[in-house]
Image: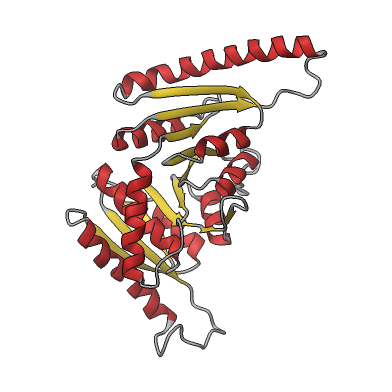
Amino acid sequence: MPRPVTVGLNGTPASLAAAAWGAREASIRHLPLRLVSAWEWQPYSHAPLSGTEMPEQWSRRLPEEAAAQLTHRFPDLDISTKQLTGPPPEMLCREAAEAELLAIGTAGLGALTGFLMGSVAMATVAHTHRPVVLVRPEGTPPPADDADLAQRVQEVERRDTGGPVVAGIDLGPTTDGVLRFAFEAAAVRSGDLRIVYSWNPPVGYVQGIGGDLRWRADIAAEGASMVRSLLEPWSKKYPGVPVSERAEIGSPARHLVEAGARASLVVIGRRTNRYWPREPRIGHVAHAVLHHTPAPVAVVPQD
């Protein structure tokens, strides 16, 4: 049985954007879609959300209504729903373990100020061992939920056909997961793939302006050659994916944010710290890309 594309819903415009992205992704990958919501019992919460509806009832209704709306847009898509009881980060990580990928929404604050990533999104990205895609809504949502979801689907389709897939890599042995996900994403979109490899040189590594310029040119050429060697087997496996590489000296986060400004999807990795495996964290590059890239960002664990 194929793994589904799973989407976590919480009723916000960001989660509806994630539902639209997940439905589109499941459709082009020919995978089932699973919509889930997590409800955690709160002993001191007495006021209902709207009218007499209780939070548990609202949590159960949320994925069912989204599934009904998405069925009209994707009639051939196998859509299932699931209501979970427990802490949302823990429940989402559990569902992600059985999924091809997990999509969740993040609240947008504009291109200049970047994302407002909640604790649920941060904890899920840091702990799960499956790819997690953070989706940001575009524009201002209309008042009606059904119109909002329809608009989100149109935004996803427009973005998917309007930009390349961008992947940020290093040259370590754990890069294969990022490349596999990036090539597959570009292949199902019939789009281009742009590989970004950049690094910060050690302070004071080269003395003098002339020496620095020669060193920068030499090391950039060497980096580009290493990236091409790394990409060669993947290009043979995906011959229909046009690939371009960009090897530059400078801040990896800045180069990735710039490259991702017009991307349909940005793919980055997240390493597990072997010295503190029970204290997962998001590295500074991934943190910057997640907060400042308007495109959906896929975080692939690199164990």
Quadrant location of residue 244?
Answer: top left
Give the left or right position of residue 199, taking residue 6 as reference: right
Q: Is residue 9 above or below residue 283?
A: below
Answer whether residue 303 is visible to the viewer in this image. no
Answer whether residue 10 is visible to the viewer in this image. yes
Give the left or right position of residue 255, taking residue 299 as reference: right
Residue 93 at x, y = what percent?
A: 46, 55
- Residue at (31% x, 58% y) in the render: 34
Q: Is residue 223 above or below residue 85?
A: above
Quadrant location of residue 216?
Answer: top right
Residue found at the very far left of the displayed protein: 76
Quadrant location of residue 56?
Answer: bottom left
Residue 74 at x, y = what percent?
A: 22, 55
Q: Is residue 72 above or below residue 253?
A: below
Residue 221 at x, y = what percent?
A: 58, 12
Residue found at the very far bottom of the displayed protein: 52
Rendering colour mode = secondary structure
- Is residue 133 or residue 72 the one in the foreground? 72
- Is residue 270 or residue 114 the one in the foreground? 114
Give the left or right position of residue 168, taking residue 32 as reference: right
- Residue at (36% x, 50% y) in the render: 156
Q: How many marks?
A: 0
Residue 108 at x, y = what percent?
A: 53, 57
Give the left or right position of residue 90, taking residue 102 as reference: right
- Residue at (58% x, 42% y) in the render: 286
